[in-house]
């Protein structure tokens, strides 16, 4: 009928649904001021974690050569250590899923031949997760054996955990290096995250000192280099990665809504 009167009906378009809470959050997180606040929040949280780790390592954990102190530590904090052991199992599960998602991001951005950088990251992460899982199991065994095994056994298992943790750093270096190389070729990460990768690599290399001594700052049980570096590296890396991923998610979701403020 509309053609009879020389006009056409206006095309109908489906009304877009109103933005939900996640949409509003994403838009808010793409504003430069909010991005800075988000980064500041992550930095504050990671700093708090590192402060707690410093207190535990410097004032609670026994030195690697202290057999009596090690036995006393497991007896005094046995209940808490059991909770920590259970928590590590859950952390392993979350870490495996997060690592898979992050490696998927690397895979999509990798321009190297046969994606050799991503494969390097995959094998590095598999080794890290396997070593972490074995280390957690040994820790749980040590906690259960406390009070039921000779002091020498408790101390030996404790040192095994410390040395295993010291080996985690160098094993993780290929992962961080692969992420850095992928980013430099594809522009995946912002400049600050590329620099963070370099910092993490340096920290990871410091943990290897834990295999050389049982006492002093280099030991892997409570040394400020051998032990604290093993805590500092994952906190810095995971904190930085999550900070970037949240902003990247916000910008991607905002682009889908039709507006995309600039860079992260």
Image: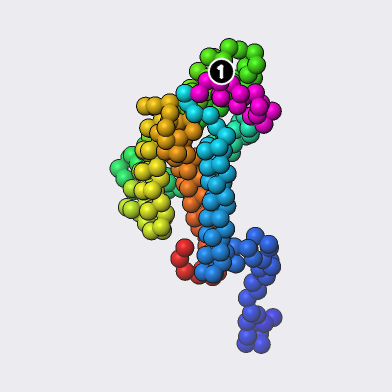
The picture quadrant where one finds residue 187 is bottom left
The picture quadrant where one finds residue 140 is top right
User: What residue is shown at x 55% (from left), y 32% (from top)?
Assistant: 61
Q: Is residue 27 magenta?
A: no
Q: Is residue 69 left or right of residue 116?
A: right
User: What residue is shown at x 63% (from left), y 76% (from top)?
Assistant: 11
User: What residue is shown at x 66% (from left), y 87% (from top)?
Assistant: 5
Q: Is residue 228 visible?
A: yes
The secondary structure that most of the magenta stretch takes on is helix
The picture quadrant where one finds residue 16 is bottom right
Quadrant housing the N terminus: bottom right
Q: Which residues are magenta?
A: 66-81
Relative image position of residue 256 (x, y in whole percent): 55, 63
Looking at the image, which is closer to me, 99 or 254? 99
Relative image position of residue 66 (x, y in whole percent): 50, 23
Q: Is residue 71 magenta?
A: yes
Looking at the image, which is closer to me, 94 or 141? 141
Q: Which residue is mark 1?
A: 154
């Amino acid at each position: 009928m509309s053609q009879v009167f020389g006009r056409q009906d206006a095309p109908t378009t489906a009304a877009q649904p109103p933005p939900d809470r996640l949409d509003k959050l994403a838009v808010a997180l793409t504003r430069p001021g909010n991005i800075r606040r988000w980064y500041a929040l992550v930095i504050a949280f990671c700093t708090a974690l590192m402060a707690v780790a410093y207190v535990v390592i410097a004032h609670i954990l026994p030195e690697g050569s202290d057999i009596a102190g090690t036995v006393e530590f497991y007896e005094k904090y046995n209940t808490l250590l059991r909770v920590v052991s259970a928590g590590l199992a859950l952390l392993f599960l979350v870490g495996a899923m997060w690592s898979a998602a992050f490696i998927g991001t690397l895979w999509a951005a990798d321009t190297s031949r046969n994606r050799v950088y991503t494969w390097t990251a995959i094998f590095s992460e598999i080794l890290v997760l396997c070593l972490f899982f074995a280390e957690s199991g040994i820790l749980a065994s040590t906690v259960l054996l406390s009070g039921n095994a000779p002091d020498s056994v408790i101390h030996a298992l404790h040192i095994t955990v410390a040395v295993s943790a010291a080996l985690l750093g160098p094993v993780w270096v290929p992962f961080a290096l692969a992420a850095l190389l992928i980013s430099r070729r594809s522009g995946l990460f912002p400049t600050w995250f590329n620099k963070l990768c370099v910092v993490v690599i340096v920290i990871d290399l410091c943990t290897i000192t834990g295999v050389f001594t049982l006492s002093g700052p280099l030991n892997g049980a409570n040394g400020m280099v051998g032990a604290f570096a093993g805590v500092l590296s994952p906190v810095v890396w995971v904190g930085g990665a999550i900070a970037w991923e949240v902003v990247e998610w916000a910008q991607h979701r905002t682009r889908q809504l039709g507006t995309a403020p600039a860079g992260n």
